[in-house]
Image (cartoon, rainbow, N blue to C red):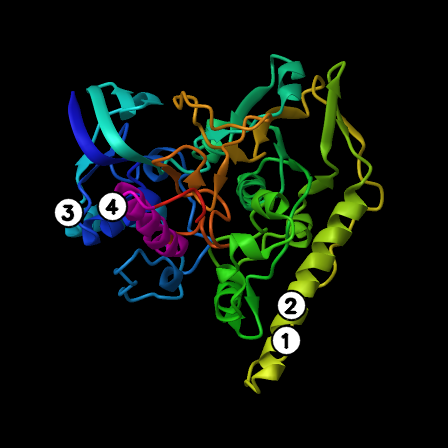
């Protein structure tokens, strides 16, 4: 059985960042991926998608953006090509077409069963990300068979769906972007809005990402927040990779119908919550608190900036619909934009809590030699972003190196 000091599972941005960090610390390692570099980006994104962060923010460790459009928003093929080039430049030892089937452990270390044969390692870094599996609620089983169902990760383009009305469920970044795209394709879209967050694309003359970075919001650490689990569950904001607004006001201007959270499907009817007003008021409140903090930061430093330009409050329909028929032909498809979950089904170790969530502290899993990267708010608020993996990789690599040398405990 082949032995490697450290095995990284996943050749996306998190796995590549960890590979660079291990190389710099002279740790022998191998990256395994079921496809190749950036497989998920290549295969599980829709055609028109652009990055939510501007190009200048999409920096891998030691590789800042040097292109001609720092304030534009990268399309996915360009991102994939950039990651492939990065893997070559850092000589990342990627073994492609290798699916991990099981990871277990005993007193001799960690054992991996893969589609290319068994491996042994002293440490394993799981870098398969938070978006391995779309989360589809159980109530989807009650959808009438005639309705076409798909997810944000399976959808590619409007032509994938039949003509006619579409119910988009979920109003985070994916949901609002796809609601916009489908409405512009000539379909009537109904958007079911659950817990969501709202931000302006630009504020006081700069991209909101610039303010989040400059004020230190994105560098807030996992051990500095009061409710870490809630922070990790925060949905992505209602933004698109470009200047065009896609918040609920902009969608209503384009005649998208806004309704409350999808609560139940019964007797061929989709039933929606009556709490749309509370959801929108909460999103507006949190947005304005953040913009208040940015304003205060500007004043405290005596900086010159454009005048505050707050978005107007979210407008509500006069009488949001509480139900829609799924049998009268008005709605012919449902797109589930209800989030994702990581997939650790191959991890055969006692490292999960009662709810099936991986137990870890800042990426250090509760079993010696096991680490995770690429999850939301892993060590910093920006851990899930391209620019966030470098700092996480450096810190976790230091812990891993100490573990290999015999001196690390779980604390990170």
Q: Mark 2 points at which residue?
A: 291
The residue depicted at 64 percent of the width and 36 percent of the height is 188
CB-based contact (under 8 Å), mark 2 and mark 4: no
Q: In this view, does 272 lie above or below 281?
A: above
- Along the line of sight, which residue is nearer the eye, 185 or 50? 50
Camera sees residue 80: no
- The location of residue 120, given as percent across then percent down, is 23, 26
What separation in Å lies between label 2 and label 1 (alpha carbons)?
6 Å
Tag 4 or tag 2, which sits nearer the N-term? Answer: 4
Q: In this view, does 320 lie above or below 137?
A: below
The residue depicted at 54 percent of the width and 58 percent of the height is 244
- The location of residue 370, given as percent across then percent down, is 36, 35
Specify start and end residues of the magenta stretch as a single range: 387-407
Q: What element carries label 4?
A: helix
Depth check, mark 3 against mark 1: the one in front is 3
CB-based contact (under 8 Å), mark 4 and mark 3: no
Would you say the magenta stretch is mainly helix, strand or loop?
helix
- Look at the image and say whether residue 397 sits in the magenta stretch: yes
Query: Counting other residues with Cα less than 10 Å from the Cα at mark 3, is it few (<14), some (14-19), or many (20 or more)?
Result: few
Q: In this view, does 408 lie above or below 72?
A: above
Q: What element carries label 2?
A: helix
CB-based contact (under 8 Å), mark 2 and mark 3: no
Query: Counting other residues with Cα less than 10 Å from the Cα at mark 2, is it few (<14), some (14-19), or many (20 or more)?
Result: many
Q: Name the residue under label 4.
A: 19
């Amino acid at each position: 059985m082949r032995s490697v000091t450290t095995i990284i599972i996943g050749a996306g941005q998190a796995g590549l960042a960890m590979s660079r960090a291990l190389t710099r610390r002279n740790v022998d390692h191998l990256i395994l991926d079921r496809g190749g570099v950036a497989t998920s980006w290549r295969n599980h994104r829709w055609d028109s998608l652009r990055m939510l962060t501007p190009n200048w923010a999409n920096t891998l460790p030691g590789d800042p953006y040097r292109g001609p459009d720092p304030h534009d928003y990268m399309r996915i093929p360009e991102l994939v090509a950039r990651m492939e080039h990065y893997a070559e430049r850092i000589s990342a030892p990627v073994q492609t077409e290798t699916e991990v089937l099981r990871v277990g452990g005993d007193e001799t270390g960690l054992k991996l069963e893969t589609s290319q044969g068994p491996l042994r390692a002293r440490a394993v870094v799981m870098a398969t990300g938070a978006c391995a599996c779309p989360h589809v609620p159980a109530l989807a089983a009650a959808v009438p068979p005639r309705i076409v169902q798909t997810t944000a990760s399976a959808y590619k383009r409007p032509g994938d769906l039949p003509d006619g009305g579409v119910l988009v469920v979920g109003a985070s970044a994916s949901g609002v972007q796809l609601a916009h795209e489908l409405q512009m394709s000539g379909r009537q879209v109904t958007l079911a809005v659950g817990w969501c967050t709202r931000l302006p694309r630009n504020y006081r003359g700069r991209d909101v990402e610039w303010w989040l970075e400059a004020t230190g919001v994105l560098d807030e650490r996992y051990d500095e927040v009061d409710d870490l689990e809630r922070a990790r569950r925060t949905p992505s904001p209602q933004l698109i990779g470009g200047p065009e607004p896609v918040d609920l006001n902009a969608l209503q201007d384009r005649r998208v119908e806004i309704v409350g959270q999808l609560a139940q499907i019964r007797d061929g009817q989709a039933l929606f919550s009556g709490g749309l007003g509370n959801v929108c008021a909460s999103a507006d409140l949190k947005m304005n608190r953040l913009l208040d903090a940015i304003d205060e930061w500007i004043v405290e430093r005596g900086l010159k900036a454009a005048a505050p330009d707050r978005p107007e409050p979210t407008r509500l329909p006069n009488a949001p619909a509480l139900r829609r028929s799924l049998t009268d032909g008005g709605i012919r498809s449902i797109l589930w934009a209800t989030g994702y979950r990581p997939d650790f089904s191959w991890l055969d170790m006692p490292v999960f809590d009662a709810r099936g969530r991986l137990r870890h502290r800042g990426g250090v899993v509760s079993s010696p030699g096991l680490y995770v990267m690429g999850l939301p708010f892993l060590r910093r608020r920006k851990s899930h972003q391209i620019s966030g993996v470098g700092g996480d990789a450096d810190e976790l690599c230091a812990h891993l190196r100490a573990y290999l040398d015999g001196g690390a405990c779980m604390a990170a």
